[in-house]
Image (tube, helix red, strand yellow):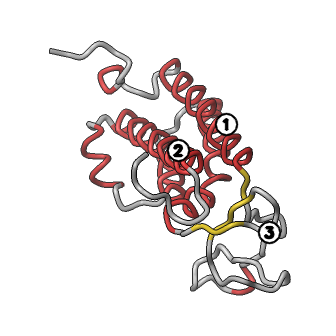
Amino acid sequence: MSAAIPGCLTERHLTLFGTIVQWFARHELLMRKIMATVIGSDSAAVILLTRGLSFGDMRHAVLDLLRHRRVPLDQFDAVYRYLELPDALSTLCDKIEHSTWIPGPSPSSIQPDWILPRPRTIKPMYAAADTRSEDFAEDDDEKVEYTLDDLEEAAETLGRNYEGFSDYVREVGLIDPRMDERSPRRQ
């Protein structure tokens, strides 16, 4: 890489950031293909309709659609389980996409550059500004710093999850074979 790397980030950090974001993009495209198959549409139309949705919104949309179309419960449950992992890591993806990064308090760690230095008693909050206070519960285990090992684990886990998810939806027919990038190209 010939360009200067910003701040405390190394080439490896940037590679892992890109890998994590790419796995999220693949999960999102797979959800769109499922939606297109279930409603009998082409994926381009579903992509246009869902392009402004967050990962969480798209997850809710595909799950609601599967339930509405009365997909067998075992298939619904499997899709739900495959989407749990990326849902749990979506905050990390949002941090990668929307934060600058600084060295973390632990050796070899980085963290998003928010209101820092911050007292230990202040944690970042991940709720919409219009969330009612009684509906908001701060997660004490919310991760605010990451090592290269943490990022590598997230990328590898997302990759394995995607491969399993992709194989599963193809196996049970939740993806139209004509939309499948693994199929030979139609002439």
Left or right: 25 with respect to 124?
left
Q: Residue at the location (61% across, 62% down)? A: 8
Disc 2 residue crowd, few under 14, some 14–19, many 20+, Cα 10 Å: few
Is the residue 141 above or below the residue 18 in the image?
A: below
The residue lying toward the viewer, choosing from 180 and 174, is 180
* Quadrant (top left/top right/bottom left/bottom right) for the N terminus: top left
Look at the numbered discs 2 and 3 and tell me whether their residues touch, using CB distance below 8 Å: no
Tell me the kind of residue under disc 2: Thr
> Which mark identifies residue 105?
3
- Label 3 and label 1: CA atoms lie apart by 25 Å
Identify the secondary structure beneath mark 1.
helix
- Mark 3 Cα within 10 Å, few/some/many (few <14, many 20+)? few
| Mark pair 1, 2: CA separation | 15 Å
Q: Residue at x 68, y 66 (%)?
A: 111
**In the depicted view, which residue is nearer to us: 178 or 148?**
148
Judged by depth in the image, the label closer to the viewer, 1 or 2, is 2
| Left or right of 113 on screen, residue 119 | right
Badge 1 or badge 2: first in the primary sequence? 2
Where is residue 90 drawn, in percent x and y? 60, 56
Residue 104 % position (x, y)? 74, 66
